[in-house]
Each structure stands twice: as structure tokens, then as C-alpha cells.
């Protein structure tokens, strides 16, 4: 599904190398997790994959089902099935959540040559998905993320994911800011979408999320590279011992 | 500005003025002599620093091609309204509804002016004359002196059916002058709609007297003809507990200057003026100027100025807005917001927000900003699959939302939003 090959990325504005040769492959139907110290480049990786401005790829590439991702516009990547749940969801005053979602769903359908969803079908669809995530009607009417609590913003990200039904979902610290119940809701939302044709890349600092969303593989990212990969037990190790041991092992 | 008037000197000659009854003749003669003393605006006037008056004062109006609306449904056609149509500045009885309505006296200005005694005497040119201080507005004076058509409306009850003034433009070289007055008696209520390009060059004055506890709602859409020019003035006096709310939407037009002068004279009154502008210089020159002057004379009144402009391809925007709080106007709550969204480097926006406050217990503020599209928001939308042009237009409409929210009637607000959306969509495809 997602193949990242020797990806080197620097900031466009300054001479600062952030990703220094990331190699990663997430096969179809799998859940991979990325953990790693603050500032190691996890969010940068997710932004570069989704096409945010401000970065320069100096080496390497990334493909989604064989298609070169890095040549596409952000909207094309989305239409190709890539989705990023933002670490910091953006507030958009004046744009209603509902309008935003309907525009997005229909734009993607159009890009894929499918028919647009009727207003009635859309309403039915979104109501069902929102109910699962305990998102009330008021939140759908309000401007995108404006005045939402931290946890509400994260649930809104998962709602978007559920509506857009992407095939490659990247979740950047979706668990941060969630209370215990919300964490369960969000995990259930994610698990409901698990499917043999859909993959997840879950960025998190905490083992707790991975109790709910069971990963197939855990990667450790440090200083712009994947330095270690393993099974779910790797997350437990990090939880107990932090990164010091792992990093020392690499340096040695 | 009318074809009968070739120069400023001609303005003061009696034969340039329309025939009328005594009160109207007096008002026009008075205006003509005021204008002679004041002179027409020139480029050197501070008040015309950012908008050149040349093409508004020239003897002959520049021609403006009549836009083909290609069978598009006219604005407000779905609204149950009393329609009054002017074609190139001339009342069209055929196209208009009968001038009558419950709680309403409505008459053509020409008819009212022919009478020797008329209530409009106390308003016509009166609020305009009062609005000449501290700044001169000679084009409004000129309008008072020369206008022959328009409507006079007296509202005595809560009128639910809006009065809708429709300004059609059919002659590419028309030079129209209209002057209307509205008097809302105590507790009366009226919605006034205005739409259409009116003429190649259009001068419009609206004087509105809102008596105690009355409510005046005004929604205006200026026509989309690219080369048309408009100079409009609204003068209003708002009495105690009364509400005055005005919203204007403008897309296209070579030159538009909308002046609004409001005196809040009774306690606990509310006056809001708002504008939403979309200007794209690619289809022809675009210059839009909002000039607003609100004076608080009374206690505990609220005023709002909410002006939003989206400009690109060399489109130019101007805002001159003032809140003047007189010494007795304690507990004034005045707010002025003028913002522009520049979609490229060629567009420009000039703003002069002013507060002048002589009372000590007031809350007044102003904010004027010039910004670009929020890149974070744009990326967020694109990352959900919304193509850049659609995402940009969503953000443009969102930017205008504050101003549109000033429209009280939800259906009309929705129609205005729909028209702005359609304008954006036409440029996208
Ligand atoms: N636009 C930018 N300007 C300056 N520095 C940046 C920029 N983007 C990223 N960086 C730097 O790149 C490094 C990696 O940042 P990134 O946000 O990818 O880390 P992260 O692994 O997601 O961290 P966290 O766990 O705290 O979310 C950090 O040192 C960060 O300060
Ligand atoms: Mg991060």
C-alpha cells in the first residue's frame, strides 16, 4: 500500500534537514505504529506525505499503490485515498463543518469519476457516522473546529476519515488530548474502518492507544530515521524504559 | 451629471432644474446654491484621496456596456415584494407594481414634487444638507438639485412585504439620478431592497428617517455590469429605540462609491451598516469605495460598521469610516471592522478608520486588516480532497460571512450568499 523509500526532507526556508532517509512499508490491511521522541520528524513525515508546503524532498520517494505520491497535489493524494488526521486540526471560521464535509466527499467522488452524493443521502450518512462518534448535530453545524475542545477536534478528524473512507490513514497523535472514554470512541471508530483493503499508520507517544488499536508493527523514529521496527512488544518496551536504551543500542 | 447639465455653472441656472411645486423647487434651488458655494469634488480633496471623482463629475458619462444576464433569474424574484422599476433612471409604470400597500404611502418623487404641500418636504434634501458637516458631499447636493425621479415612502405600520427598487440598465450611455426618501413613523417597520446596475453612471441618494421604535432594514445589490459607475449616498436619522440596518453587496463595476451618513439621535438606538465586495480586475477595472460616517448624539446606542472586501487582479478597495461620539453620548457601543482579503499582489486596499470620542463612558473600537488567504486552512481543505479553486472560494465566502450575517432576513441572506457563490463559481469553470 504505502512505500517510503530513503526519504530525505529539508525545510524549504532554511538549511535544516529533518528526515534523513526514512524507509517504511505498510502493506494493505495492516496497522503500523510510529513512536519516537519529540522532534524526531514524525509529523514532518505525515505532512510531507500529504503534500504540505514548506518542505523540500532532497532524495527518495513515496508511493501509494505504486503511484508516486510526491508528484501529486494534496487534493490528488486525498482522492487517491490518503488521509491525514492532523496532530493540530485547523480551525476554519465561517465554513460550516457540514458544508466542508459535503464539499470534500463530493470533490473526491468527482475526482474519481463517481457521481456526487445527494443532499439527502449525505445527511443520512453523516448522521450515522456522527452518532457512532457521539458528535452532536450542533458540532456539525458549527464552523470547522472553531471553539471545539481538544478532544472534539480529534473526534472530528475521525468523523472526516469515516466519511471519506480513505485507503491509507495516517493518524498523528490522535490520542493526545482525549479522555479515556473519547479514546475508546476514537479507537472504535478506527477499528470499525479496519479492512483488508485499508491500512493505518498510527503516530503516538503512548502504548495506551495501541491497546485499543492493535498494531501489526511498531517503528521507532529518531533524528529523522526509522531506527528500529518490531512487534507490539516494542511499544511496551518504550512505555517502560523510554527511548534511552533503544537509542544507545543504535549508536553502539 | 444629467445630460441637461453640462457644467457646474449650468447647475445653478434655473432652467436646468425640473419643474415642480413650491416645496420641491425650493429644496432644489437651495441645493443648487449650496453646490455653487461648495464646488464639485476634485482630486485634491482629502475626502477623495483614494477615489478619483473625475469620471463622476465629467459633463458626459462614460458609456458602459449592458451586461447580458443570460436568462439568469433576477435577484429577489422569489421574494413577495412591492416592485418599483426604474429603467436607466426613469420610472417604468408597466414593469412596476401598483404603488400601494398596507401601512404604506408610496409615490413617485415626480408626483410628490408636483404638489404644493407634501410631507416629503421635511426630508427631501434635509437629511442630505445635515450630512454636509463636517465633510462636504457635493455629489449628494448635486443629486438633490437635479434628481427628477425616485420614490417617497411613508411607513405607518409594520409592513411585511418589502419595497423593492429595481434599477435596470438598458442604454449604454445612460446617466441616471434618483433620489428617494423614506419616513418610518413611530414603531413602523420596513424592509427596502434595491438592486441592479441602474445606468452607465448612477447617482443615488436615499434619505431615511427612522422614528422612535421603528425598524428599517435595507439590502442592496449593485449591478454586475463591468463598466458601470455609481455614486450613492444614504443619509439617515435614527431616533430612540429604533433600528437601522443596511447591507450592500457589490460585485463588478468600474467605479463605486457608497457613502453612508448616520446620525443616531435618540437613546438606545441601533445602527448597523455592512458591505460585502468581490472585485476581480481581470474582467475590467474595479474600484470600490465605502465611506461611512456615524455620529452618536444619544445615550446607550449601538453602531456597527462591518465591511469586507475580496480583491484580485488589480481590483482596488477603499474604506473611510468614522465613528464620532458627541459629549452627551455616554454608554455608546461603537464598533468598526473593515477587512480586505487580497488574493494576489496586484490587488490593493486603502483604509482610514477613525474614532473621535468626546464622551468618557463608551466602548468603541475599530479594526482594519489586509490579509491573504490562510494557507493553513487552505492546506487542510485540500488535504480532504477539495481542489484549490473550490477551497479558496469556500474561504472567500467564509471571509464575507460576518458582513452577510448583518442581514436580518435568513432567506434574503441565503439568496445573497447564493449569488456570491455563483459569481465565484462562474469564474472557476
Ligand atoms: N516549519 C518548520 N520550521 C522550523 N522547524 C521545523 C519546522 N517543521 C519542523 N521543524 C522541526 O523539525 C523537527 C521535527 O518536527 P516534527 O514536528 O516532525 O516532530 P515530531 O516527531 O512530530 O514531534 P512531536 O512528537 O513533538 O510531535 C523539530 O525539530 C521541529 O522543530
Ligand atoms: Mg508531531
Image (cartoon, coloured by chain):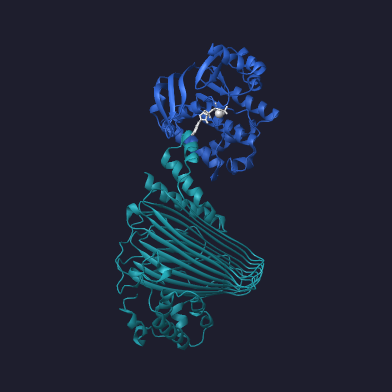
Q: Position of residue B416 (x, y in %)?
A: 49, 55
Residue B95 visible in the current orientation: no
Q: Quadrant of the image for the C terminus of chain A?
A: top right
Residue sitting farthest toward the front: A252
Q: Position of residue B262 (x, y in %)?
A: 54, 70
Q: Residue B211 lies in what quarter of the image?
A: bottom right
In the image, residue B7 above or below residue A27: below
Colour of chain A in the rendered structure image: blue
Q: Position of residue B127 (x, y in %)?
A: 52, 77
Image-quarter location of ligand 2: top right
Residue B78 visible in the current orientation: yes
Q: Position of residue A78 (x, y in %)?
A: 46, 30
Toward the viewer: B417 or A54? A54
Horizontal relation, residue B260 to residue B43: left or right:
right
Count of numbered tags: 0
Colour of chain B in the rendered structure image: cyan
Toward the viewer: A117 or B66? B66
Q: Residue A11 lies in what quarter of the image?
A: top left
Horizontal relation, residue B87 to residue B319: left or right:
left
Amino acid at each position: 500500500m504505502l512505500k517510503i523509500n530513503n526519504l530525505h526532507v529539508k525545510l524549504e526556508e532554511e538549511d535544516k534537514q529533518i528526515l534523513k532517509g526514512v524507509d517504511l512499508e505498510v502493506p494493505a490491511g495492516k496497522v503500523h505504529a510510529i513512536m519516537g521522541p519529540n522532534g524526531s520528524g514524525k509529523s514532518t513525515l505525515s505532512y510531507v506525505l500529504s503534500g504540505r508546503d514548506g518542505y523540500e524532498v532532497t532524495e527518495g520517494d513515496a508511493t501509494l499503490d505504486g503511484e508516486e505520491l510526491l508528484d501529486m497535489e494534496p487534493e490528488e493524494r486525498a482522492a487517491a485515498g490518503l488521509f491525514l488526521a492532523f496532530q493540530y486540526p485547523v480551525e476554519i471560521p465561517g465554513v460550516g463543518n457540514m458544508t466542508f464535509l459535503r464539499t470534500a466527499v463530493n470533490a473526491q467522488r468527482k475526482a474519481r469519476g463517481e457521481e456526487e452524493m445527494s443532499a439527502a443521502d449525505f445527511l443520512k450518512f453523516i448522521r450515522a457516522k456522527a452518532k457512532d462518534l457521539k458528535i452532536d448535530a450542533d458540532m456539525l453545524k458549527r464552523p470547522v473546529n472553531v471553539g471545539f475542545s481538544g478532544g472534539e477536534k480529534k473526534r472530528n478528524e475521525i468523523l472526516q476519515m469515516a466519511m471519506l473512507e480513505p485507503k491509507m490513514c495516517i493518524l498523528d497523535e490522535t490520542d493526545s488530548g482525549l479522555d479515556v472514554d473519547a479514546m475508546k470512541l476514537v479507537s472504535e471508530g478506527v477499528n470499525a474502518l479496519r479492512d483488508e483493503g485499508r491500512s493505518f499508520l498510527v503516530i503516538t507517544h503512548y502504548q495506551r492507544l495501541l491497546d485499543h488499536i492493535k498494531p501489526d508493527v511498531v517503528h521507532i523514529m529518531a533524528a529523522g530515521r526509522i531506527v528500529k521496527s518490531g512487534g507490539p512488544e516494542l511499544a511496551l518496551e518504550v512505555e517502560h524504559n523510554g527511548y534511552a536504551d533503544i537509542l544507545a543500542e543504535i549508536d553502539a | 451629471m444629467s445630460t441637461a447639465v453640462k457644467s457646474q455653472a449650468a447647475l445653478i441656472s434655473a432652467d436646468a432644474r425640473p419643474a415642480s411645486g413650491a416645496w420641491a423647487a425650493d429644496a432644489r434651488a437651495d441645493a443648487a446654491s449650496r453646490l455653487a458655494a461648495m464646488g464639485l469634488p476634485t482630486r485634491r480633496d482629502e475626502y477623495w484621496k483614494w477615489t478619483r471623482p473625475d469620471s463622476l463629475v465629467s459633463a458626459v458619462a462614460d458609456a458602459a456596456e449592458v451586461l447580458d444576464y443570460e436568462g439568469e433569474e433576477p435577484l429577489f424574484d422569489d421574494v413577495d415584494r412591492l416592485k418599483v422599476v426604474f429603467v436607466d433612471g426613469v420610472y417604468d409604470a408597466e414593469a412596476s407594481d401598483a404603488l400601494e400597500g398596507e401601512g404604506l404611502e408610496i409615490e413617485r418623487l415626480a408626483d410628490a414634487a408636483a404638489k404644493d404641500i407634501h410631507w416629503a418636504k421635511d426630508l427631501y434634501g434635509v437629511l442630505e444638507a445635515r450630512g454636509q458637516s463636517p465633510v462636504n458631499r457635493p455629489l449628494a447636493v448635486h443629486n438633490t438639485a437635479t434628481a427628477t425621479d425616485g420614490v417617497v415612502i411613508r411607513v405607518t405600520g409594520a409592513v411585511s412585504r418589502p419595497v423593492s427598487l429595481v434599477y435596470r440598465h438598458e442604454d449604454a450611455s445612460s446617466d441616471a439620478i434618483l433620489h428617494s426618501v423614506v419616513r418610518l413613523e413611530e414603531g413602523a417597520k420596513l424592509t427596502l431592497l434595491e438592486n441592479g446596475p441602474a445606468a452607465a453612471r448612477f447617482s443615488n441618494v436615499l434619505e431615511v428617517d427612522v422614528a422612535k421604535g421603528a425598524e428599517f432594514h435595507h439590502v442592496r445589490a449593485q449591478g454586475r455590469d463591468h463598466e458601470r459607475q455609481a455614486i450613492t449616498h444614504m443619509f439617515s436619522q435614527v431616533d430612540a429605540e429604533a433600528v437601522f440596518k443596511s447591507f450592500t453587496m457589490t460585485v463588478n463595476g468600474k467605479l463605486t462609491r457608497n457613502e453612508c451618513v448616520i446620525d443616531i439621535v435618540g437613546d438606545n438606538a441601533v445602527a448597523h451598516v455592512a458591505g460585502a465586495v468581490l472585485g476581480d480586475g481581470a474582467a475590467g477595472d474595479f474600484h470600490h469605495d465605502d465611506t461611512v460616517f456615524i455620529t452618536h448624539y444619544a445615550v446607550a446606542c449601538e453602531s456597527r460598521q462591518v465591511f469586507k472586501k475580496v480583491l484580485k487582479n488589480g481590483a482596488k478597495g477603499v474604506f473611510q469610516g468614522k465613528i464620532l461620539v458627541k459629549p452627551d453620548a455616554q454608554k455608546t457601543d461603537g464598533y468598526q471592522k473593515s477587512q480586505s482579503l487580497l488574493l494576489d499582489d496586484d490587488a490593493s486596499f486603502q483604509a482610514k478608520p477613525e474614532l473621535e470620542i468626546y464622551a468618557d463612558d463608551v466602548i468603541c473600537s475599530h479594526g482594519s486588516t489586509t490579509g491573504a488567504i490562510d494557507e493553513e486552512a487552505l492546506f487542510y481543505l485540500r488535504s480532504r480532497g477539495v481542489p484549490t479553486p473550490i477551497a479558496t472560494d469556500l474561504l472567500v465566502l467564509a471571509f464575507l460571512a460576518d458582513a452577510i450575517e448583518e442581514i436580518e432576513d435568513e432567506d434574503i441572506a441565503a439568496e445573497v450568499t447564493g449569488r456570491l457563490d455563483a459569481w465565484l463559481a462562474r469564474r472557476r469553470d
